[in-house]
Amino acid sequence: MEENNKIVVTREYEKKMSEISPFELKDILIRLADESARKSTHIMLNAGRGNPNWIATTPREAFFLLGQFALEECRRGVKLEDGMVGLAGVPQKPSIAYRFREFLDKQEGTPGSELLRDTYNYMVRVKNVDENDLVHEWAEGVIGDQYPVPDRILKYTEVLVRDYLDQALCNNQPPKGKFDLFATEGGTAAMCYIFDSLQQNFLLNKGDKIVLFAPVFTPYIEIPEQARYLFDVTEIHALKMTGDGYHTWQYQEKDLDVLKDPSVKAAFIVNPSNPPSYALTPGLTERIVDIVTNYNPNLMIITDDVYATYVHGFRSLMAELPDNTLCVYSFSKYFGATGWRLAVISLHEDNIYDRMIAALPDDKKEALAKRYSSIMLDPSKMKFIDRMVADSRQVALNHTSGLSLPQQTQMSLFASFSLLDSENLYQSRMIDIIHERLHTLWKSSGFTLLDDPLRAGYYSEIDMEVWAKKFYGDDFFEYLKANYEPVDVVFRLAQETSLVLLNGGGFDAPEWSIRASLANLKTEDYVRIGEGIASILHSYAAKWQESTKDK
C-alpha cells in the first residue's frame, strides 16, 4: 500500500503486486531501491531490464560516414538555397557508385570506411547487384528523403539481412529456397503484427488452442488473454532437472506430445529462452520436427530468436521447419540498439500460411478479398507476409507503410558488420562479456552453476526454492511458503540491498525464482548482486532457525 506517497510493503500488498507484469512491478522496486540507497552507502543497481550497456561502434561509424557522402550528393549540382541556409536536392543515381568509390578513397582510414567498402564489394562482387542502384538506395536511405519502397523492406537491405540471418540463425546452412523479410519497428512491433495478421486472415481465431513454451517473455502470456483473442492456452514448462536437483531449463520430450493434437493451431517459443536464456537441445528440436512432419503438419510455429547470437552454432526452428515457422529477430540486444527499434519478421517463400489462406472456405476468402481489394486486383495472390505489412497500417495506409529508410540503412550495416566478420570476433567478445558477468554473479552467490554450451546467459534465472532446499532442507522451504509471498525476495532485495531484479513468476517461471539481466551492469556490480541474493536467503534461514528454537 502507499501512505503519503510512501510504499508500505505488507504481505497483502506483495500478493496484490504479484498479479501485475514484472515490468510494471519493476518501477515499484526501483522506487524502493532508490529509497534504500538514500539511507545507506549503497548505490541502486538495476538488473531488472535487459538494455545492454554496450554498442557496436563500427556499423554506426559507417552509418555516419555514409551520411556525409549522401549530403554531398544532395548538394551536388542542385542549387536550391537562393539565399536560404540548409536546403539541397536529393541524391541522383547516374554514376553515383563511381563518386562513392572516390569518396571512400579520400576517406581511407576514417572510422567506418572499411566496412562501407567491404559491404559495397560484397554486394557488387559476391551478390552481383547493380552498383549504382545499390549506392543510390544507401544514399537515399541514410538521408531518409523517400517513402520506403518496397514497403516491406528495401531491396538491398533484404539481401544483406537475409544473408546475416542465414549466418546467425541457420549456422550458415539455410534450407533450400529463400526467406522473405518484413522490417519492423523492433521485436515488439513484430509481435503485434503477427498476432493481428494471424487473426485478420482467419489463421488463428478467437478461442483457438495454442501452446506457449514457458518460461517466456511476458507479452506472449498477456496478449493471448486479451478480449479480441482469448486463446485456449496450454503451457509447456522447462522444468527438467538433473538427477541431483539442478535446473537444466529444458523441456521433457513427453511434454511436447501436446503438439501432436491437430486442434493446436500455433506454438510460441522464445529460443534461446527469456528467461532463463537457454537454447533448445538438438533432441528437442528433432522431436518438434518429427511431430510436425508426422502428426500436425499445419502447426504454425512463431519463434522469437533475439538471443540466438549468444550461442555458438545456433540453429533456429526456421532452419529446420521453414514451411511452418514465422521468425522474429531483433537487432537491439546484440548491437546495443534498443533505441533504434530494428527487427525483422522472416517467413520462407514456400509456407503453410499462404497455403492455409488459399484453402479457407469461400466466405472467408470473400471477406479477405474485400479487405485487401484496394491493394491488388486479385488479393488471393497476396502473400501472408505482405498482408502483415498492409495490416500494420490498417490496410488503407499501406502506401505509406514500412520501416523508415535510415532505420533500414543502419540495420543493413549491422547485418554486414557481423556477416563480414569472418573470424566472429564481435560474437566471441559479446559472449565473453556476458559469461564473465554470469560467472561472477553465481560465484558471488555461493550457488552452483552447471556448464552448458546451450546457455546464452543474457539473463540468469535463480530458483530460490532449489537453493533453499540445497542449503537448509525441505522444512526450511515449507517455512518460506507458509510465511512469505514468492515476490518477497525481490522486495527485500530492493529494500535491504538497493538491488532491482524481476520476479520469475511473472514469466511463468518457478514462482520462487528471480531474473537477473547480465547485460546492463559492470562485471564488478554482479559481485554485489550475487552476495545480495545469498544474504536474503540466509536471512530467511536465520529467522527460521530462530523460530524453531522456540518450539
Image (tube, rainbow, N blue to C red):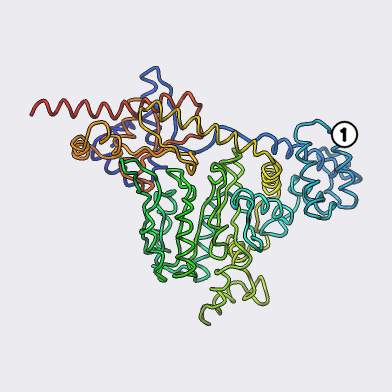
Question: Which residue: 41% across, 27% down?
Answer: 443
Residue 341: x, y in percent?
59, 46
Query: Please, which residue is most extreme toward the front here?
Result: 243
Residue located beneath label 1 in the image = 106
Does residue 332 appear to the left or right of 94 in the view shown?
A: left
The quarter of the picture where residue 339 lies is top right
Does residue 25 appear to the left or right of 545 in the view shown?
A: right
Query: Please, which residue is most extreme toward the bottom here?
Result: 362
Question: Which residue: 44% across, 31% down?
Answer: 46
Residue 73: x, y in percent?
85, 44
Query: Please, which residue is most extreme toward the top here?
Result: 41
Residue 83: x, y in percent?
87, 39
The residue closer to the viewer here, 423 or 392, is 423
Asked which secondary structure carries label 1, the reply is: helix
Does residue 158 appear to the left or right of 528 in the view shown?
A: right
The residue closer to the viewer here, 331 or 11, is 331
Does residue 354 appear to the left or right of 210 in the view shown?
A: right
Please tell me how crowded label 1 is: few (under 14), some (14-19), or many (20+) other residues with Cα within 10 Å.
few
